[in-house]
Amino acid sequence: MNVAELFVLLADAEPDAVVLLLPAYAEPTDAAELASVEIPEKPWIRETHFDDGEPVVVDHYPDNQELTYGRNDAAGTYEKERVVILSPEFTVDFQNLTESSGTETARSSLDKLYDEALREQRLMVLTGTLIPEDEFRRRLGVSRKRFARLCDEGSVFGVDVEGALYYPASLAVAGHNRARLHEVCRIIVPAQDDRLDFLSSRRVSLGNRSPLEMLDADADYARLLFVAEAWAAEFSRTVVRLFVGIHETEPLDVEPMYTAMSENDPRKQVWERASSALLAHGYQWPLGPYPEARSFTAFVAHQNVGDPELRPDACVQIVVDGEFIRVRTIFKERMGLQSQAVHVGKLGTVVEVAKRAIGYLIGRDLK
């Protein structure tokens, strides 16, 4: 059977029907759920032998393997043909079996993951899980202008499949509470490519239900918002580093006096994120005791999942003068604000002073 014939046979199957693999002569209870679809880059060998003049297919195998044991090369035919491999196992590495010589290296694991994701996306398009923009807008019942606004807000999102944008059909289901669904989508914007998986997957934190099943009851929705915010925060972290002295850029030749880090939504106000990093009992180094300092600079940056670099957000220059501190902020756009004097009373270590200074900046609603 070839792929075209398989498509014809599956034409009337329900798109969400589970695919089971049943070995020859096996009992129904031996059926295993399909877990992996592999499309080898290179053709495999189709080895055919004859019995009483009738062709019998003995085996398929990568073209770098030996002939079937016990067979005579002259007694059969050996042809190359393209194959698709269905397997109940995720871990079978069929791709490496197709390498024809030691001069060719196996593709990287990242390439394999990309190919697997692409195949899953193609399947979602084929089954209608992802639909084109025109159909998505028609189901939503919105104009192009309204649709563009929903996309800009993060209320809906598309999935890039080979350069074309498709949209999750689940976001346009009439039975869903769309206002609540749009709010959840806006919360999980930092997750980008993982958003559809979050919305459609059952989660232990939601009582083994998916977010799409948590939109109606108020208590369920409140729980969903809490879980969504915590999950989205995992895709970005905020880092605060304290250096002795007054600086406009982070020193490269000295170690920071103190570093704090926490997971935060990168869309939150920079000083809120910085305060969370300083107050959260997450990553802190060193553990103390911390020195007192007459002047120091706190640099705030963020790092998104998959990005190896820290992205600067702002810094605050802090000078201690008795029971007062003077603070001056500089943002990543190199825009600085005038120094401001703040009465904070009795002061302690640089960490305590930094917490008070950044708390003051939150109250001023700066950036």
Image: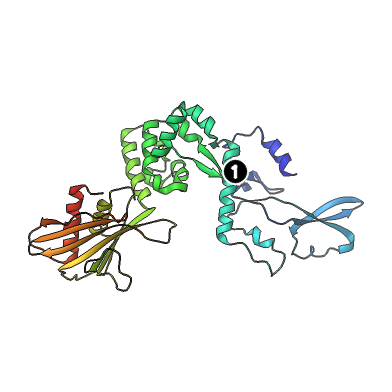
x%, y% of residue 82?
Answer: 74, 52
Q: Give whichever of 144, 224 is nearer the camera.
A: 144
Q: How is the image coloured?
A: rainbow
x%, y% of residue 255?
Answer: 29, 72
Left or right: 267 in relation to 143: left
Left or right: 122 in relation to 196: right
Quarter occupied by the N terminus: top right
**Residue in view at x 42 percent, y 45 percent:** 203
> Residue 222, located in which quarter of the rendered image?
top left
Inspect the image, locate mark 1, and give the three-letter code of the amino acid beneath it.
Answer: Arg
Q: Give whichever of 334, 110 is nearer the camera.
A: 334
Left or right: 320 in relation to 167: left
**Residue 313 seen in this snapshot:** yes
Q: Name the outermost residue toward the bottom.
A: 253
> Residue 180, located in which quarter of the rendered image?
top left
x%, y% of residue 350?
Answer: 18, 66
Tell how many labels: 1
Q: Give whichever of 345, 244 is nearer the camera.
A: 244
Q: Residues within 10 Å of mark 1 (few under 14, many from 20)?
A: some
**Residue 352 seen in this snapshot:** no
x%, y% of residue 159?
Answer: 51, 42
Label 1 sits on a secondary structure element that is helix
Left or right: 275 in relation to 137: left
Q: Name the outermost residue toward the right.
A: 53
Instruction: From this view, report whether residue 87 is shown above or below residue 346.
Output: above
Q: Name the outermost residue toward the top.
A: 141
**Residue in view at x 44 percent, y 47 percent:** 192
Residue under numbered circle 1: 122
Q: Give whichever of 188, 66 is nearer the camera.
A: 188
Instruction: From this view, report whether residue 188 is shown above or below residue 46.
Output: above
